[in-house]
Each structure stands twice: as C-alpha cells, then as structure tokens.
Image (tube, rainbow, N blue to C red):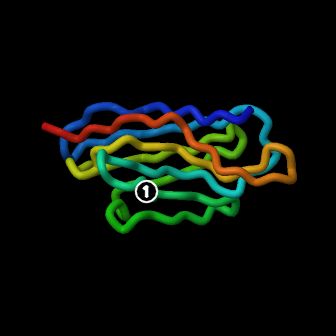
Amino acid sequence: QVQLVESGGGLVQPGGSLRLSCAASGSIVSFNNMGWYRQTPGKQRELVAVINSGGRTNYADSVKGRFTISRDTAKNSVNLQMNSLKPEDTAVYYCTSYLTPDGYNWITYWGQGTQVTVSS
C-alpha cells in the first residue's frame, strides 16, 4: 500500500513563505514523477508544479519565479518552497505521484491534502 503524506501547510501573511513536504512510503519500485496540485472550493484541481525522474520541472504560470519544487530521491520525497505568497495562493495543496508499486502497473497516487492560507 503506497501512501503520500504531506506536511508544512498553514497560515502565512502575504509576501511570506512556506515549505510543503511530501513523503512517499510503501511498496515503490520506481517513480515517473512527483508534484503538487491545488484546489479551492468550486474549482477544479490545478497543477502547481511537477518534477520527473530526470529532474525536469514544470510550473503553472501563476507560480513561476515564486515556487520551487525539489526532490529527495533517497527519501522518496518532494518539497515545494513557496515564496512571495499571495492571497490567491490560498488552497488545499495535494501531493501526487505517478509510480509503479510492482514494476508492471503505473498508478497515480494522491495525498490527503494540506491547507495553505495566505491572509493578513
């Protein structure tokens, strides 16, 4: 059973910073990518940032230059450093990973989500 566990959400003032972390555990043979999505009430979940097994990154235009995604391959974890936060960054942030638990089947897993609130 694969689990993704997020941490690091919370309340921060506009212009502040937060660092989200996500650790994957369980039976994992290989990752294709790990990343972060976010969702606000009434809206679809949207991509924030993703990093693939080769280290290539992709960011939503709205976070480019402010957010940085990184991976710790040895720890099966991914981090999201969020700087210059804006009220519109307020959302539930979900960790996700496309991986194979058995070397044959590739599955997308999701974490439980962590709330990020940017407000004065």
Whether 26 is drawn above or below 81: the answer is above
Disc tally is 1
Specify whether 62 is left or right of 36.
Answer: left
Q: Nearer the viewer, residue 95 or 53?
A: 95
Question: What residue did someone put label 1 on?
Answer: 48
Specify whether 96 is left or right of 31.
Answer: left
The residue at the far right in this view is 103
Whether 2 is drawn above or below 89: the answer is above
User: At 42% across and 47% down in the image, what residue appears?
Assistant: 81
Where residue 23 sits, quadrant-wise, is top right
User: At 41% across and 64% down in the image, what residue appears?
Assistant: 60
Percent from the top left, x then y, of residue 93?
42, 43
User: At 43% across and 56% down in the image, what residue appears?
Assistant: 48
Label 1 element class: strand
User: At 70% across and 33% down in the image, what residue appears?
Assistant: 25
The C terminus appears in which quarter of the rendering?
Answer: top left
Structural crowding at the residue carrying mark 1, measured as other residues with C-alpha within 10 Å and reported as few (<14), some (14–19) or many (≥20): many
Indicate the amino acid at tag 1.
Val
Percent from the top left, x then y, of residue 51?
58, 58
The residue at the far bottom in this view is 61
Specify whether 83 is left or right of 79.
Answer: left
The N terminus appears in which quarter of the rendering?
Answer: top right
Specify whether 78 is left or right of 30.
Answer: left
Percent from the top left, x then y, of residue 111?
55, 38
